[in-house]
Amino acid sequence: MRNEIANFRDCKSIAIMGGTFDPIHHGHLVTAEAVRHRFKVDKVVFMPAGHPAHKDNRQVTHNEHRYLMTVLATMRNENFEVSRIEIDRPGVTYTIDTIEELKKICRPDVRLYFITGADAIHQIMTWKEPERLLAMCDFVAVTRPGYQKNKLFEEIGEIREKYASRIHYMEVPALAISSSDIRNRALKGEPIKYLLPQEVEDYIHKFGLYQHAQQEEVKFMLPLEVMQEKLQSALSVKRYIHTLGVADEAVKLAEIYGCYEDQQKARVAGLLHDCAKDYPKELRLRLCKEYKIKTDEIMEQQTDLIHPFLGAEVARREYQVEDEEILNAIRYHTTGRADMSLLEKIIFIADYIEPNREKFDGLEEARRLAYLDLDMAMKYILEETIAFVKERGRLLHPLSVEALEYYKNR
Ligand code: NAP
């Protein structure tokens, strides 16, 4: 048994301090101590995330650096521990997996609190198995001064009511310190002294961390395999297989009609085109409001039409895709629109003809046209789709009508 586990396995109550800790700073330490005091927990276990599921727009510093900085920062407090559970677990870091692991090694009656930034709590319904997670531990949402709390309170209230969960709230003035500010300061050569423990500052200098801007410029932070793993947990098996088919088909079309850059983009857009499709209806509607996605009457009546527009926003926020071309390919992959870009057409067509599709009338013709001329394939697929929509008595989106008009006249 690892020592770290021996140090908290018999505790009656534990607060888990979840975060990327890139780097850990005094705001985190003050928060942990304040929570320990308020909730009278035996230990606070710092849990640096391995491959954060919802990361910010940059590459995260190597796990071992973040882990060691957290150890250095917490070593003077006997009530603080640091866990390698997430650092050592391969794949994307999901809190539910961590809580399950802790429940297995701790006393059966242990009370667990999960402390994290309010922004993360805000997104909690998009986490893996949120309802089960909310039932397994208390959450403590901490904010820094100046945080707009009204929306957070509203959401906490809704979640509490709906899932009978326990979400607490705490404002921590010391969280005026932030990891991103420390990184920016280090990059500009400005002092970071007194914002974090001296040992952590020494460590940052020793290993030259946060000195290069290029870390912040990476366009897709999630490596493709991490993206796929995340998608696999967000989608049904059938949809995931379809997604892989669309990505492969899109790359093939991009090879024929585009350049190398298009192939890369085609893979990402293909993988993510349905990333929000399995979200339940309520979550779709709530996220549209939250992300300020305009919905029209047709989308509201036929909520399936929301998924491409929401998907683009989820791709931006959850998968850190910044490229507008990719986001538009996701956004218009269901309705189409007039005068689509090469990538938009590729994803629209790949979605229709991907190799894992079960046979249906018109599939072979669509495949034949796709390898002959993309605009002809667009016209054919739009005609077939519009006929199908009408036949089923479903509502037709005006974007599809405009698209067909456009491709008929090409
Ligand atoms: P993050 O990138 O480290 O933090 C986002 C924001 O919240 C930052 O402003 C950060 O401030 C603040 N923050 C984060 N953790 C904090 C803490 N414990 N105390 C005070 N402020 C904190 O982290 P994240 O990606 O939002 O993830 C936070 C935690 O939620 C992690 O443990 C992560 O694994 C978990 N999570 C799980 C799922 C899932 O299971 N699907 C999804 C998302 C997040 P600083 O930059 O100053 O730290």
Image: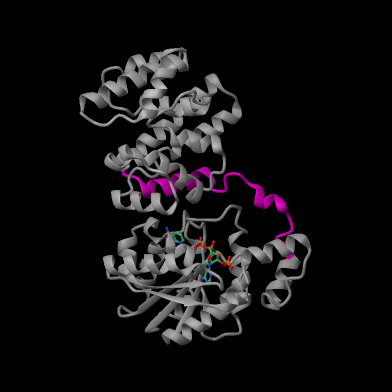
Q: Quadrant of residue 159?
A: bottom left
Q: From the viewer's perspective, is residue 137 above or below residue 258?
A: below
The stretch drawn in magenta includes residue 226? yes
Which residue lies most toward the front here?
297
Q: Is residue 7 visible?
A: no
In the picture, measured across the screen, residue 276 lies left or right of residue 303, that is right
Report the coloring of the rendering. Answer: one colour
The percent coordinates of residue 175 (x first, y second) are 58, 74
Q: Residue at x 62, y 59 (%)?
A: 61
Viewer-nearest residue: 60 or 173: 173
Q: Residue at x 42, y 84 (%)?
A: 39
Q: Residue at x 28, y 66 (%)?
A: 163
Q: Is residue 75 visible?
A: yes
Which residue lies most toward the right here?
189
Q: Residue at x 67, y 52 (%)?
A: 215
Q: Quadrant of residue 204?
A: bottom right
Q: From the viewer's perspective, is residue 265 above or below residue 199?
A: above
In the picture, measured across the screen, residue 238 lies left or right of residue 188, that is left
Q: From the viewer's perspective, is residue 406 above or below residue 218?
A: above
The percent coordinates of residue 268 (x first, y second) are 50, 37
The stretch drawn in magenta includes residue 239? no
Viewer-nearest residue: 76 or 256: 256
Q: From the viewer's perspective, is residue 297 above or below residue 409?
A: below
Viewer-nearest residue: 246 or 188: 188
Q: Across the whole image, how many numbered discs are drawn on residues?
A: 0
Viewer-nearest residue: 191 or 72: 191
- Bounds of the magenta span? 207-236
The percent coordinates of residue 331 (x first, y second) are 44, 37
Screen quadrant of the N terminus: bottom left
